[in-house]
Image (spheres, grey):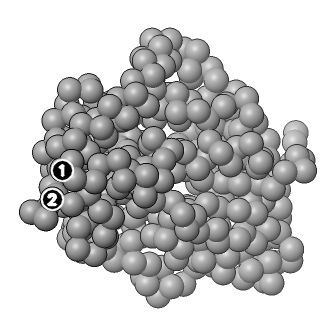
Amino acid sequence: MSSKPRLYSGMQPSAESLQIGNYIGALLNWKALQQTHDAYFSIVDLHAITVAQDPALLRENTRRTAAQYIAAGIDPSASTLYVQSHVPAHAQLAWVLNTITGFGEASRMTQFKDKSARQGTDATTVGLFAYPTLMAADILLYDTQIVPVGEDQRQHVELTRDLAERFNSRFGPTFTVPEVSIVRDTAKIYDLQNPAAKMSKSAESHAGVIWVLDEPSVTAKKIMRAVTDADGGVVFDRENKPGVSNLLTIYSVMAERSVQSLEDEYAGRGYGDLKKGLVEVVAGTFGPIRERVQELLGDPAELERLLAHNAERAASVADVTLARAYAGVGLLPRTSQ
Ligand code: AQP
């Protein structure tokens, strides 16, 4: 085992392209963390199917998500980048964890409450209800010490800790109890048309979503039409100027510059100039990523070979933990013939 601390994180292949919030809130951090951690990055397709997906699109989006991880700087030889469903232990451990999770406990998960309220009872599946126990399995299979997530995922990681401790006290030491590591300085990116709402792949309207893989002209139009305010001052004030503040956050992260230096540069110049500057910076970052994604998707066999190789590496760790958990609960091992 590597001496570096073990880290696990993932994203759902729930759209053809990632959006800039995924890039800033997840990929940029992952890229930095892969240097100092033994990192496992998964494309969580089993989580994606907890809401309806078109099968052909899901396959394609899984390849595209993998290509975007790599193009954005995740190195598949330095970290383990794989597709969740390629490692059967995820679903197998999730089942065991379901059997020690209280119905009431799972019912209290706010993501489930929000998503099920949006979808209505008939469209809400048992799979969506069990989303957090599958996530717990993802984390526990790799003896993960650190799970870098946004505040919205804190409750799920806390459930994971509770389940690990419960299992260990009932069946003996089996799982490493992970730390909740909320990435505090991770910028939260908001929808350009509705700066009160988180930018999201599954937003109802795409007018306020910047996609990593969009043509630069499409992204430029969206940025130029971003909602601001009538005040005209390029000043960061999340409370009173949420639209401008969101643009400044994106600009600051993408250009690796302080918000203060942007405020100084654009003082007295108005929002048009700020937006034009942002258009350039986004195009400069996403241009090379788009090209690299096209290259990777041009050779799907090579991409799939790489994913298969990484899945083997992941499975060799996950299978050991699963065997420990199965033995712990008393499942009779299948002996070799
Ligand atoms: N707006 C955002 N700002 C900062 N970080 C964000 N993330 C997502 N949106 C923002 C981070 O990206 C990762 C993606 O996680 P996910 O794909 O499992 O699901 P999500 O968080 O629900 O992301 P989306 O884009 O909103 O997907 P859908 O619409 O499919 O649910 C996480 O690390 C998240 O913090």
In the depicted structure, whether residue 177 falls above or below residue 301: below
Q: Which residue is mark 1?
A: 270
Q: Position of residue 5 (x, y in %)?
A: 81, 56
* Quarter of the image where the C terminus is located: top right
Q: Earlier in the sequence, mark 2 or mark 1?
A: 2
Q: Amino acid at mark 1?
A: Gly
Q: Position of residue 257 (x, y in %)?
A: 48, 47
In the depicted structure, whether residue 228 falls above or below residue 301: below
In the depicted structure, whether residue 125 falls above or below residue 108: above
Q: Amino acid at mark 2?
A: Gly
Q: Left or right? Give the position of 103 relative to 196.
A: right
Q: Left or right? Give the position of 332 relative to 130.
A: right
Quadrant of residue 238 in the image? bottom left
Q: Which residue is mark 2?
A: 232
Q: Position of residue 136 (x, y in %)?
A: 61, 65
Rendered residue at 77%/48% (across/down): 36
Q: Mark 2: few, some, or many residues within 10 Å (few <14, many ≥20)?
A: some
Q: Position of residue 113 (x, y in %)?
A: 34, 77
Q: Is residue 305 visible in this depiction of the protein?
A: yes
Q: Mark 1: few, some, or many residues within 10 Å (few <14, many ≥20)?
A: few
Tally the marks. Answer: 2
- Mark 2, secondary structure of its residue: loop
